[in-house]
Structures are given as structure tokens and as C-alpha cells.
Image: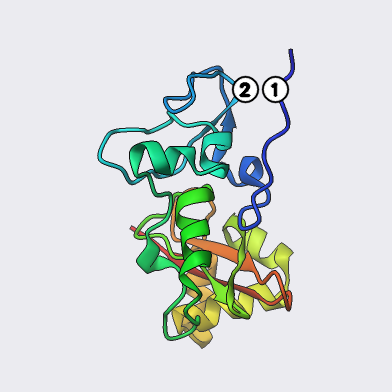
Amino acid sequence: MPPEPLPAFRYHPEPIATGSVVPSDRVCRCCGSARGFIYAGPTYAGTDLDNGLCPWCIADGAAHQKFSAAFTDLDSIGDTDLWPPVDPAVAEAVAFRTPGFQGWQQERWFTCCGDAGAFLGPKGRLELEDAGEEALTAIREEIGYEGAAWEKYLDALNRDFGPTAYLFRCLHCGRLGGYSDFT
């Protein structure tokens, strides 16, 4: 039997493409079902839940209710020099009912227009260039590099081997935003 369609995630629309959800025959530790997919991103909880939760238990909040699980740190959602704070209900939707993503350091979530952005995935130089000039500008402005320093850093960006860029799109105005980090 083919797996059922994934739940829709407003703030992480393509969790398979980003690598946060993977095909798996594992049983979810929350609902006890093997539904064909498992969450492979970071989980913050009092118990080890790595690769142990299905996307459905994330989407409906069951994993948060049962394990007090969070998938992104509440303090890492907006509220930076470049990104505005958002309503606590928005931050909770991202932290508790949206698949997170694996970064090299502390993950951060882009905000714009009073809402969280949609995570588009990790990007290296090639993927960032494919996303266009606006994507390149967003990452350059966030890291604060110019000229030769920016070119050297851009050359080093790699989707899988840091430094890595993380790209988002505003759900309202369409603006791209993001950041990069490295080990």
C-alpha cells in the first residue's frame, strides 16, 4: 500500500525535498503507526525522539502534546536585527507543529510581514545562484560580507558540507530571506 499523502505544512511546504522528512518503515513513537515517512530533523524534548516521529503527529500537535517536543527553538524565530518578531501563536506553530531543519549551528527562522516565512531548504552556491539575485542578496546582507570576502564565502557555500545557506520565502510579499552558518 502506498503511503498516505503528507500533511500540508504552511511554513515548510516541501519537507521531503529539504530532507526533513524521509521515506521510512519506522513506527512513530507518538501514534504507533508506520505511515511510510518519518521526521529526520532536530527534535528538542526530554526524551530521545530522533527519527522517531511521523509528520502527522508533528502537524496535529500530538508530538508536542505527548513529549513537549519542539522542532525549532522559539527564541530562534524572527526577532533579530534583520527580521521582525511575530505573534506568539505564529512562533508556536513553527516550533511545535512544523518540521524543523538541520543546520550547522542554532537554526533560525526567517520572518517578514508579521508572519514566519516558508522554508525553501538548505542551499550551496549553485542552488543559491539558481534561486536568483534576490536570494544571493538576502544571504550576503545577512552575513555582512562585501567584495572579495563575499565572493570567497559564496564560493565555499555547499548544501551538504557547510558553510550552508538556508533560504525562506515570505508567504505574503514573496520576499526571499535567510541566513548561512558553518561549523
* Residue at x-position 44% and y-position 49%: 102
- Give the total number of marks visible in the rendering: 2
User: Where residue 46 sits in the image (x, y, percent)?
Assistant: 25, 40
Return the residue nearer the eye: 123 or 20.
20
**CB under 8 Å between discs 1 and 2:** yes
Other residues around mark 2 within 10 Å, as few (<14) / some (14–19) / many (≥20): many
Q: Position of residue 157 (x, y in %)?
A: 51, 62
The quarter in which the N terminus is drawn is top right
Q: Quadrant of the C terminus?
A: bottom left
Left/right placement of residue 116 relative to residue 100 reads right
Residue denoted by label 1: 3
Residue position for label 2: 36
Q: CA distance from mark 1 to mark 2?
A: 5 Å
Which secondary structure, mark 1? loop
Residue found at the far left of this picture: 46
The percent position of residue 54, horizontal first and vertical second, equals 53, 31
Say which quarter of the image contains residue 128.
bottom right
Which kind of residue does numbered mark 2 sit on? Gly
